[in-house]
Amino acid sequence: MTTPPPRGNATIPGLDGLRAISILIVMISHAGLQNVVPGVFGVTVFFCISGYLITTLLLDEFDRSGSIAIGAFYVRRALRLYPPLIAYVAVMAVVMLAGGERPDPLGLASALFYFANYVNVFAPHRLDGIGGHLWSLSVEEHFYAAYPLLLLALLLAGRRILPVLLGICALSLASRVAISVFAPAIAVDYTGMATECRIEGILAGAIAAVVSRRGGGPAWLWDGRGAFAALPVLAFTFLVRDPLFRQTIRYTIQEAALIAIILTVVAAQPRSLLQRAMNSAPLSITGKLSYSLYLWHFAGYEIALALVPGPGWRVAAAYMLGIGLAFAIAFASHQLVEQPFFALRRRFGSHVRPPVEAADEPAPQAARSA
């Protein structure tokens, strides 16, 4: 078995590349190709990466200090996520007001206080102009409000972590099945966005981290055989169109496959073709911009569609322009909004380093295709 990444190293090789692939899937899906590109899968990948990274860092902290600084964890999360989110929501609200529209108060509150996923299920019009894509931030923040406390309790009690995480995964799957059977009218949206239905994706990444740091796992999880076998499994989940399958077990199968893929990527030798590809400059930069890309890509598309109106090839041209605009806006957001908080986050235990030290915190943020 390959040794996991060194402890205390927040830059886990390959994760930026995985995150880049995920956000590109989401962006391409939203560029009018949602019926061809499985954008929902991009969110599942983001959730898994997030669970892997956060669990790895929390386990490292416990190994070093014998505890987890829960308060500092929450502060780091807020400093990582909130400044770009506030900037995005503020700009979108101003744009709406300038256009003679009034932002919905419930929509604004749900975006800023992390309940946009439930608003997007039951009253999606409330998020018009702000963005229903903010739902996935709610899922992550609901999960991480409780997860560090649970993990710390299990570690201090000397309890096995994997059975508990697997048990919660089973409950998440059961909730999707129950909604699909007893509330089919809302099942597609609810099973795709409700916290209790989607936390399984984050837990899958957490399970991968625990296997990596605590149990080791079988060799096939690390040497590429598991990842190779996972690819046709993923293809199968994309091809099956049965609604009950797609609303329930599809997520579980995809997340199980992603465990092997994530472990293969992080365990690959530094000079291997896989690691060189995943750590290439284009993917690395895209991965670092992924949170801002997630927030702003719809805005880039709207601007481009306004600049290049019309049917046919003009739509394709507009979306290509929109992708470029999204990258430009995301870079500006990263430079002007995210980077100023790097040093402050380090005061609360973050491993992130300012750009002059050539590193960034690989804290993935979830996105999702509509």
Image (spheres, rainbow, N blue to C red):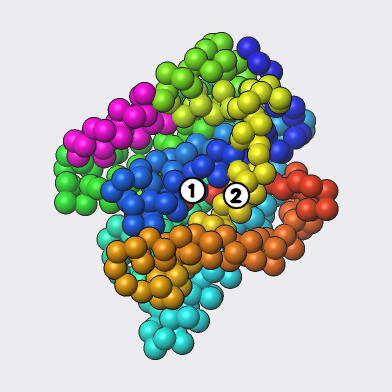
- Residue 127 position by quadrant: bottom left
**On screen, residue 259 above or below 324:** above
Task: State the SS at label 2.
Answer: helix
Residue 288 within the magenta-colored segment of the rendering: no
Task: State the SS at label 1.
Answer: helix
Segment tinted magenta in the rendering: 232-256
Contact, CB < 8 Å: mark 1 with mark 2?
yes
Residue 368: x, y in percent?
A: 41, 50
Residue 272: x, y in percent?
A: 66, 23
> Looking at the figure, which quarter contains the C terminus?
bottom left
Residue 66: x, y in percent?
A: 74, 30
> In the image, is 165 to the left or to the right of 35?
right
- Residue 293 position by quadrant: bottom right
* Dot label at residue 286: 2
Q: Which residue is mark 1?
A: 24
> Looking at the figure, which quarter contains the N terminus?
top right
> Is disc 1 surrounded by few (<14), some (14 to 19) or many (20+) residues within 10 Å?
many
Residue 251 within the magenta-colored segment of the rendering: yes
> Is disc 2 surrounded by few (<14), some (14 to 19) or many (20+) residues within 10 Å?
many
* Dot label at residue 293: none
> In the image, is 72 to the left or to the right of 47?
right
Along the line of sight, which residue is nearer the eye, 309 or 117?
Answer: 309
User: Separation of disc 1 and disc 2 at Cα?
Assistant: 8 Å
Residue type beneath disc 1? Leu
